[in-house]
Image (spheres, helix red, strand yellow):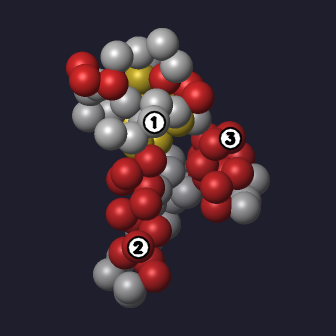
Amino acid sequence: MNAPSKHMAGFDNSARAPFAQLVDAAKVASLLGVTENWVRDHSAGSKRARGAAIPSLRLGRYTRYDLAEVNDWLTGLKNGKC
């Protein structure tokens, strides 16, 4: 079983929802080595996004990113599928 992430500390792993790895633009930017503004500008639903947008989820006024979907998106870019 995987160890819980720092953000999910205190949650029971056995009942973890499929979206348990939702993170904000700052975390995605850190992982990709870009700025938060770049991530926001290239997110799905952004008016500035062109081409293959970073998959994201709107939760009211917040935008969150599923790490598994971001990883799949990045893999697609590397393999020329996006």
Tell which of 47 and 61 is nearer to you: 61
- What residue is rendered at 75% in x and 53% in y? 35
Residue type at mark 2 is: Thr
- What residue is rendered at 32% in x and 33% in y? 19
**Number of the front mark, 3 or 1:** 1
Q: Label 2, label 3: how many angstroms apart (C-alpha)? A: 20 Å
Q: Which residue is mark 1?
A: 3
The disc at residue 63 is none
N-terminal label among 1 and 2: 1
Q: Which residue is mark 2?
A: 75
Q: Quadrant of the N terminus?
A: top left
- What residue is rendered at 52% in x and 33% in y? 5
**Number of the front mark, 1 or 2:** 1
Is 31 left, or right, of 4 in this rendering? right
Q: Position of residue 30 (x, y in %)?
A: 70, 51
Q: Judging from the image, what secondary structure is the residue with disc 2 in? A: helix
For residue 64, say whether it is visible.
no
Q: Judging from the image, what secondary structure is the residue with disc 1 in? A: loop
Cβ atoms under marks 3 and 1 closer than 8 Å: no
Q: Position of residue 17 (x, y in %)?
A: 26, 26
Residue type at mark 3 is: Ala
Q: Judging from the image, what secondary structure is the residue with disc 3 in? A: helix
Is 33 left, or right, of 22 in this rendering? right
N-terminal label among 3 and 1: 1
* Neighbourhood count class around disc 1 (C-alpha, 10 Å): few under 14, some 14–19, many 20 upward: few
- What residue is rendered at 64% in x and 61% in y? 32
Q: Label 3, label 1: how many angstroms apart (C-alpha)? A: 22 Å
The disc at residue 26 is 3
* Neighbourhood count class around disc 2 (C-alpha, 10 Å): few under 14, some 14–19, many 20 upward: few
